[in-house]
Amino acid sequence: MLACVALTTSCMLVACSPLVLAWRAPVRISGYHGDGAISRIPHPLNPGFKVDFEEFSLSKPYRATYRVGGLPQRRRYDAYRAAIVVGLTPDEDAAWPPMPAWVTSRPVGTMTLTLRDPSGTMMFHGSHEIASLRWKSFIDDLPYGRFHSPRGEKDPSWTLFLDSVDLEHQSPAELEADYVPGPDAPDRLARVRILAGGFE
């Protein structure tokens, strides 16, 4: 009898554990019909997705327009983020964190991103020096620098990637990328990324 009570109690504790209660199904990515490569970000509590676009050299000017139709719905507590992924050497990757000094201590270059809806209306617009990005990393992935609103900035054009936006009412169509290298920009590869979820 005591064994049955103990087993029942154990099952109830497992079933009611935060991990089980908060588990979420993977994000659906099959509806994406834009440019770049979309993939899931596995996470037991907050699974997400990322879209990585073509690589470019940080030493040269770069301009591109990406189609981004059909982005997966983010969960209500998530935000869509814009980010830059920078290529690292094996030694630099093994030493992460922090980012190498060449990324954070000198002006590498400035990336400007503009997101537009199907009518051409701007939904998001922001510029960042690569060195000023906020760097994070997922397991088995290169670090990525997130675009963020400047401290004290209240410009609503930042809200797509910083606050809650419902894609049922706001439908992104194109993301414009315009990169201008700094005077000492290294010949390293980088790429633009859109992501949501997957918090570690």
Image: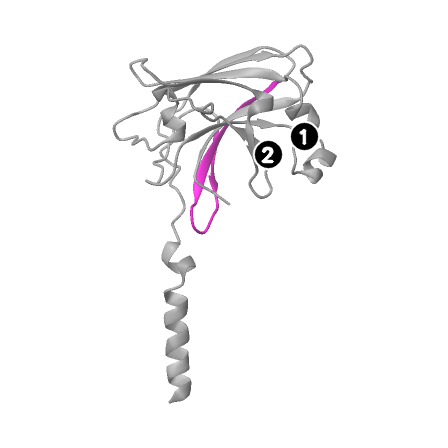
- Residue 173 seen anywhere in this rendered image of the structure: no
Position in image of residue 156 (x %, y %): 34, 21
Q: Is residue 64 left or right of residue 76?
A: right
The residue type indicated by label 2 comes to Pro
Task: Give the residue displayed 45% in from the left and 24% down from the top.
Answer: 35
Q: Is residue 40 magenta?
A: yes
The residue type indicated by label 1 comes to Leu
**Highlighted magenta segment, given as a residue range:** 37-57
Residue that carries the numbered disc 1 in the rendered image: 88
Q: Kindly state the secondary structure of the residue where label 2 is placed.
A: loop
Residue that carries the numbered disc 2 in the rendered image: 143
Q: Main secondary structure of the magenta part?
A: strand
Total count of labels = 2
Of residue 184 and residue 54, the one placed in the foreground of this image is: 184
Position in image of residue 19 (x %, y %): 43, 58
The answer to whether the residues at label 1 and label 2 have Cβ atoms under 8 Å apart is yes
Q: Is residue 84 left or right of residue 176?
A: right
